[in-house]
Image: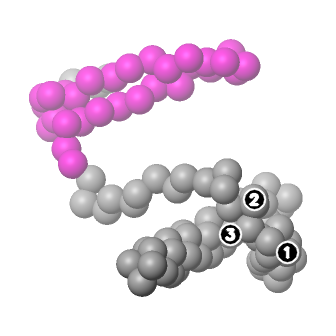
Amino acid sequence: MCTDLEGKFPHTTVYALNREISDHTPLLVNTGELSSTYQPQFKFELGWLLRESFMDMVTNIWHNTLVEGTALQRWQTKIRKLRQYLRGWAKHISGHYKKKRRRS
């Protein structure tokens, strides 16, 4: 860490993460500042796999997301679109399930 960064962010800490398979050691820099753009973490629910049309829905989204670029760029774009769709779908299903439970 350079002294310029340390001067701007005096509470900065740097952690070395496990390097697993690479010969490089990734570093995690924490400035102590809160990010203004909070994105909740995506969580895949195993119960989704039990839903009748789930695999068809995923296949549809995957094949209908057309992108250019390298294989990695295409995969990243497709997985991002799938994640966005599943977030909305999960909220809808959850809300529908809660309404159904209240009526019972």
Residue for badge 2: 49
Q: Which residue does the image show at 41% across and 29% down from the upper left?
A: 28
Residue 82's disc is: 3
- Residue 97 in view of the camera: yes
Residue 20 image offset from top left, x and y in percent: 66, 18
- Percent across and percent down for residue 85 are 62, 75
* 36 vs 43, nearest the viewer: 43
Q: Which residues are magenta?
A: 5-34
Is residue 17 left or right of 32 when viewed as pictured?
Answer: right
Separation of residues labelled 3 and 1 (CA atoms): 13 Å
Dominant secondary structure of the residues highlighted in magenta in the image: loop
Query: Which corner quadrant of the image does residue 9 belong to?
Result: top left
The x and y percentages for residue 17 are 49, 20
CB atoms of marks 3 and 2 within 8 Å: no
**Which corner quadrant holds the C terminus?**
bottom left
Residue receiving disc 1: 56
What amino acid is found at the position of numbered circle 2 in the picture?
Leu
Mark earlier in primary sequence (2, 1): 2
> Residue 101: where, in percent of width, then height?
45, 74
Earlier-in-chain disc, 3 versus 1: 1
Q: Nearer the viewer, residue 67 or 87?
A: 87
Q: Residues within 10 Å of mark 2 (few under 14, many from 20)?
A: few
The three-letter amino acid code for the residue at tag 1 is Asp
State the CA–CA distance, disc 3 to disc 2: 15 Å
Secondary structure category for the residue under label 3: helix
In the image, is residue 73 above or below residue 53? above
Three-letter amino acid code at disc 3? Leu
